[in-house]
Image (cartoon, rainbow, N blue to C red):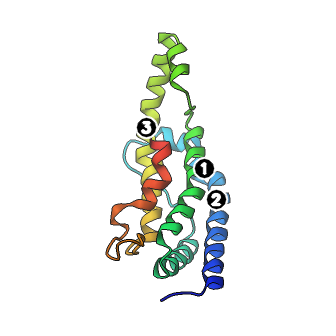
Amino acid sequence: MRFDGAADRAETERFLRAVDDLRHLAPSSSVCRRSSYRSLQSIREINLFPTDAIADLHAIASRMAAAGYGRECVQVYASVRKPTVDFALRRLGVEKLSIGDVQRLDWDALEAKIHRWIRTARAAVRGIFASECRLCFHIFHDLPLCTSTATATVADDAPFAEAIKGAAL
């Protein structure tokens, strides 16, 4: 199924608004409470958004993928989710440092930061990244997102990878 240009733009705008509405929910949710991350001992996925909002996003993503705009859909999703993932990591106490900043630190300060990074990485994998992966699955499952290959589906985890790659690095 193909949409005309105006319908394509309308669907894209609707998807942008829906994802943008979700951006405002995350900072006030339990995802961003510092104590909820520090006590994680196993993988605990957190429901990030209401089920009806996820269903709406899935329907919009389905339409965009069917119209051949799967790649654009992934780009929009990632551009909106990246700041939320970064925000959650900042709430855990992660600060971005350049290589020069790290080299200027004395050993005791660097060792303390390394211990914090290890704890944060564990919490991020168990909570933030697991929850984001689950959200991506619910929105994009069984959708052909790559316009170059009709058989490509979300199995390659493109939306999830795009949303977290900066934070993971």
Instruction: Assess disc 1: are there few (<14), some (14-19) or many (≥20) residues with their C-alpha within 10 Å of its C-alpha.
Output: some
Where residue 149 sits, quadrant-wise, is: bottom left
- State the residue at coordinates (60%, 58%): 80
The residue labelled by disc 3 is: 121
- Location of residue 129 in the rendering, given as x and y in whole percent from the top left corner: 44, 50
Where residue 12 sits, quadrant-wise, is: bottom right
Indicate the amino acid at tag 3.
Answer: Ala
- How far is mark 3 from mark 1, CA to CA? 17 Å
Query: Answer yes or no: do the residues labelled 2 and 1 have beta carbons within 8 Å?
Result: yes
The numbered mark, 2 or 3, whose residue comes first in the sequence reads 2
Query: In terms of secondary structure, where does tag 2 sit?
Result: helix
- How far is mark 2 from mark 3, CA to CA? 22 Å
The numbered mark, 3 or 1, whose residue comes first in the sequence reads 1
- Location of residue 31 in the rendering, given as x and y in whole percent from the top left corner: 56, 51
- Location of residue 133 in the rendering, given as x and y in whole percent from the top left corner: 42, 58
Query: Is 33 left or right of 102, judged from the image as shown?
Result: right
- Location of residue 32 in the rendering, given as x and y in whole percent from the top left corner: 59, 47
Count of labels shown?
3
- How far is mark 2 from mark 1, CA to CA? 9 Å
The residue labelled by disc 2 is: 23
Query: In terms of secondary structure, where does tag 1 sit?
Result: helix
The residue labelled by disc 1 is: 83
Query: Is 53 left or right of 117, judged from the image as shown?
Result: right
Residue 102 - label: none
Residue 80, compared with residue 115, is above or below; it is below
> Disc 2 vs disc 1: which is toward the camera?
1
Residue 13, compared with residue 39, is above or below; it is below
Indicate the amino acid at tag 2.
Answer: Arg
